[in-house]
Amino acid sequence: MIQKRFILIEHFCRGEVLHLGGGEPERGISLNNLLKEKHKVWSVDIQRGADYVRDLNAKDWKIKRTFDTVLAPEIIEHVGNPISFIRNCARLTKKGGICVVSTPNASSLIYLYNPRWCVTDPYLGLVHIHAFTKPMIEEIMKAGGFKIVYSSYLNEFLYNPFGRLICHIFPRLRGDIFIVGRKL
């Protein structure tokens, strides 16, 4: 099953795409597989198999070209300096290009129920260094040189029907933030 986030990301992709954190294995339905059907995609990750093996915590990622679209899905919460991260995204985005950022929502119903949710993932053993709200990500992207062109909350993935109803009525309580910025 293709995630709603994948479909939304693909909708905003134009031209050559740089996928940050995109070094996941190429099995089954992945964002890379979906994007490669329509776009030329380069991946950046600390894992072998990525087009650019880089540490996204580094001050300079040492990529000497720009892209029409830069994707940062579910990665900004893992980096030490989110503002530096977004500035690197801006440096790699062509003027008028798009940067897409998604991250867990620190004001979500799930986070309110379990405050550790945005900071750690007990199932995957991943540690999130930061937790963000939508206004926080919007301000970081603006400071990095992007104009916000689309902003929403995604994923009513609660299994509780009452929780799904609450998230339907109050979208800001949904699990993820999805922001698209155009480079000025």
Image: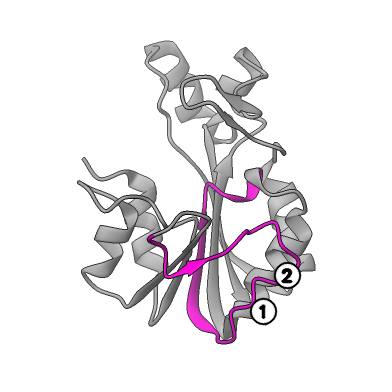
Circle number at residue 91: 1
Instruction: Locate residue 91: give its quadrant.
Output: bottom right
Residues marked 1 and 2 touching at CB (< 8 Å): yes
Q: Quadrant of the N terminus?
A: top left
Q: What residue type is labelled 2?
A: Arg
* Image position, residue 74 (x, y; %): 53, 46
Regarding residue 139, the answer to whether it shows in the image is no
Give the labeled residue for mark 2.
87
**Residue 162 position (above or below residue 75):** above
Task: Look at the magenta stretch and give its main secondary structure.
Answer: loop
Separation (CA) of disc 1 from disc 2? 6 Å
Left or right, 121 with reference to 59 = left
The magenta stretch spans residue 51: yes
Regarding residue 96, the answer to whether it shows in the image is yes
Q: Quadrant of the C terminus?
A: bottom right
Instruction: Locate residue 82: give its quadrant.
Output: bottom right
* Image position, residue 47 (x, y; %): 46, 54
Badge 2: how crowded within 10 Å, few (<14), some, or many (20+)? Answer: many
Q: Give the range drawn in magenta.
A: 49-77
Badge 1: how crowded within 10 Å, few (<14), some, or many (20+)? Answer: many
* Image position, residue 38 (x, y; %): 24, 73
Left or right, 28 with reference to 98 = left
> In the image, what residue occupies the spot 71% across and 62% down?
58
Q: Which secondary structure lies at badge 2?
A: helix
Left or right, 6 with reference to 80 = left
Circle number at residue 34: none
**Residue 46 position (above or below residue 18):** above
